[in-house]
Image (spheres, helix red, strand yellow):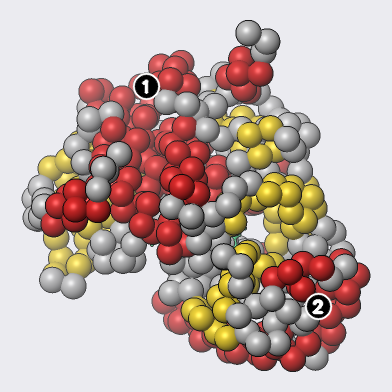
Amino acid sequence: MIGSRSEQLKLASSLPPVRSGDQFDIIVAGGGASGLMAAVSAARRTARVLVIEASGCFGGAGTTAMVAQWLGFYNGETCAVGGLPIEFAERVIARRGAHGIENYVLAEATAQPLRLKRLPFNPEVAKLVADELVLESGASALLHAYITGATSTGGRISAVQIQTSGGRIEVRASCFIDASGDAVVARKAGAPIKGRESVQNRMGMSLVFRLSHVNLERFRALSRQEKRAIALEGVARGELFWDVLSVSPVGVSDAICLMSHLDGLDSLDGSDLTRAELIGRYQVGRIMEFLKRRMPGFESSELAAIASHIGVRESVRLDGDYLLTEDDVVNSSSFEDSIALGCGPLDVHEQGGKLRLFMPAQPFEIPVRTMTSAFVHNLVVTGRAISASREANGAIRHQATAMALGQAAGHLAAHAVALQGDVRAVPAKLLQEGLAAAGGFPTRRHLRALSAPG
Ligand SMILES: Cc1cc2nc3c(=O)[nH]c(=O)nc-3n(C[C@H](O)[C@H](O)[C@H](O)COP(=O)(O)OP(=O)(O)OC[C@H]3O[C@@H](n4cnc5c(N)ncnc54)[C@H](O)[C@@H]3O)c2cc1C
């Protein structure tokens, strides 16, 4: 762990430059929830790693879209995600960027609320901790760098092309981890993809914003019925855009509000994404005024920030060696090659923001085959773009699950480097042992072993 601030400054200042033609063991596309974990865990296993991120910080939707509550650590009373994701959360807590796990009613103001556990955090502190993790790991990094293409022949990727403000460069690796959330590398390399056709059915986007000077106690003290009545009034007046009044607290008087919602736009289309940001900001303006006028606790609130990127819940996914299904989630199917546990909830947004929420009875196993493809041998896809049906995607997209998948992807790629990058040749058992040794729970068996009497 970085011992002092000056050590961090030294590491940041001496981060090696990345030049066109540079060769790495592993390139990680995207430094979000999943990519951050993948890059750090692979670098800790001594691989030469480069993580390439389009925005100016690590953390993905949790930081740039201000999705400031971790879901997916707990299924009921069981914590089913350990290892590096828990280390990340604990370090954010140690920096006073979060208080810890709390009981919470998800979608409280809607017709179908769900009790679960969440971990609200300050996204700005998460950025600081993410930087430390990357710097300590020894990984190379490029921020403000956008992957635009991949060179692939005979089922192997050799290089990716990146646009930076200084121009276009190309970097090479033995193995690639696609943690872009949008399966960018998989698409560019010609792997089969799911979800291209159904833009209208995709889950809506939300632009998150932060208000200061909120009396959080007053808001919390409202009954569910009072919140629901105000939410429905706002929707009827066209000042709220769905009936979800999601608030993540930061400190004692800031509220991160996840209340905007827009359907039917394609985040992979530049013009649609532009419309989404503009409509999102229009919604933020309306919501903010409504809250100030109508919501107890928000009377003196001031707009402190709007997320720098609209939150994209769903785009396209890998069509990989195994397609995780709703049945697998609901019935908690077992897989010999499980490498991470999902906790749920299954959280699918239909048109108009109508929610389908369901908590599986126990953590569900996610097989490594959801991350690999027979068409591209040296590629691991992780995070929300793994191979899953639309419904199963609604259950694996939470950040703690994305992080657990990311840690598994990092281990998988690190093993594959010795096998010419062939990720499908890595035995699942080897992967499970390594993940368990790093504090993870790759299968339900590992959870049971933990809870078995000594
Ligand atoms: C509105 C909203 C609300 C949500 N609510 C919750 C919640 O309450 N709790 C919870 O746990 N989860 C929630 N989620 C889900 C969760 O935030 C995401 O599913 C999760 O962050 C996915 O992780 P990821 O690593 O796959 O993708 P991301 O975290 O999105 O990371 C992908 C990264 O890749 C980068 N990238 C993309 N394309 C390129 C490129 N071409 N070149 C370089 N970099 C690229 C992006 O900039 C980004 O940093 C929500 C999501 C949204 C959008």
Q: Are marks 2 and 1 in contact (CB under 8 Å)?
A: no
Q: Nearer the viewer, residue 47 or 453?
A: 453
For ligand 1, tell me if the residue under mark 2 lies within 8 Å. Answer: no
- 91 w.r.t. 182: above or below: above
Circle 1 crowding by C-alpha within 10 Å: few under 14, some 14–19, many from 20: some
Disc 2 from disc 1: Cα separation: 51 Å
User: Is residue 93 something one can see in this rendering?
Assistant: yes
User: Is residue 371 something one can see in this rendering?
Assistant: no
Q: For mark 1, what is the residue?
A: 426
The residue drawn where x is 78% and y is 81% is 296
What element does badge 1 sit on? loop
The residue drawn where x is 63% and y is 64% is 248
Q: Is residue 161 left or right of residue 430?
A: left
> Which quarter of the rendered picture does the N terminus lie within?
top left
Q: For mark 2, what is the residue?
A: 231
> Which quarter of the rendered picture does the C terminus lie within?
top right
Residue 144, percent from left and from top:
26, 66
- 386 w.r.t. 265: above or below: above
Q: Amino acid at mark 1?
A: Val
The image quadrant of residue 42 is top left
Q: Is residue 321 left or right of residue 20?
A: right
- 442 w.r.t. 33: above or below: above
